[in-house]
Image (cartoon, rainbow, N blue to C red):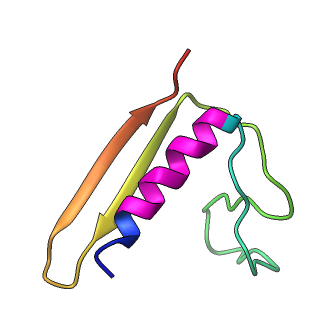
Amino acid sequence: GAGTGAVELAATVLAFQEGLVPYTLNYERPDPDCPVNVIHGEPHKPTSPYALVLNNARIVHSIAVLLAAPE
């Protein structure tokens, strides 16, 4: 729904504060044909000081927010 983008953005800010990238729930095995690096099993320390948060709505509205971790 409409609030999920705000929730995802808040989770990203909290991840920056904690210094951990949360893992993906219910992820069991990678698809060898999909080159996406999925964080699974346990949280990881970020390897980049940036996060890109993407979201879209059914009515074709899309947004991208690039966040930089505080130093």
Q: Is residue 27 rendered to the left or right of residue 42?
A: left
Please state the total of marks drawn on the protein image.
0
Residue drawn 78% across the image and 45% down it: 44
Q: Is residue 12 magenta?
A: yes
x and y percent of residue 5 in the render?
36, 64
Residue 2 x/y as whole percent: 28, 76
Q: Is the magenta region chiefly helix, strand or loop?
A: helix
| Residue span colored magenta | 6-17
Residue situated in front as seen by the camera: 28 or 10: 10
Residue 60 vertical placement versus 45 (above, below):
below
At which x and y percent is residue 3?
A: 34, 71
Residue situated furthest top in the rendering: 71
Q: Is residue 20 magenta?
A: no
| 10 horizontally vs 59: left or right | right
Q: Residue at x 73, y 61 (%)?
A: 23
Above or below, comparing residue 15 to residue 50 in the picture? below
The percent coordinates of residue 27 (x first, y second) are 75, 77
Q: Image quadrant of residue 55?
A: bottom left
Which image quarter holds the C terminus? top right
Position of 66 with respect to 50 (left or right) is left
The residue sitting at 68% across, 47% down in the picture is 21
Vertical placement of 63 versus 69: above or below?
A: below
> Which residue: 71% across, 78% down?
31
Q: Is residue 24 above or below residue 26?
A: above
Instruction: Work out which quarter of the rendered image holds the N terminus and state it.
Output: bottom left
Q: Nearer the viewer, residue 52 or 31?
A: 52
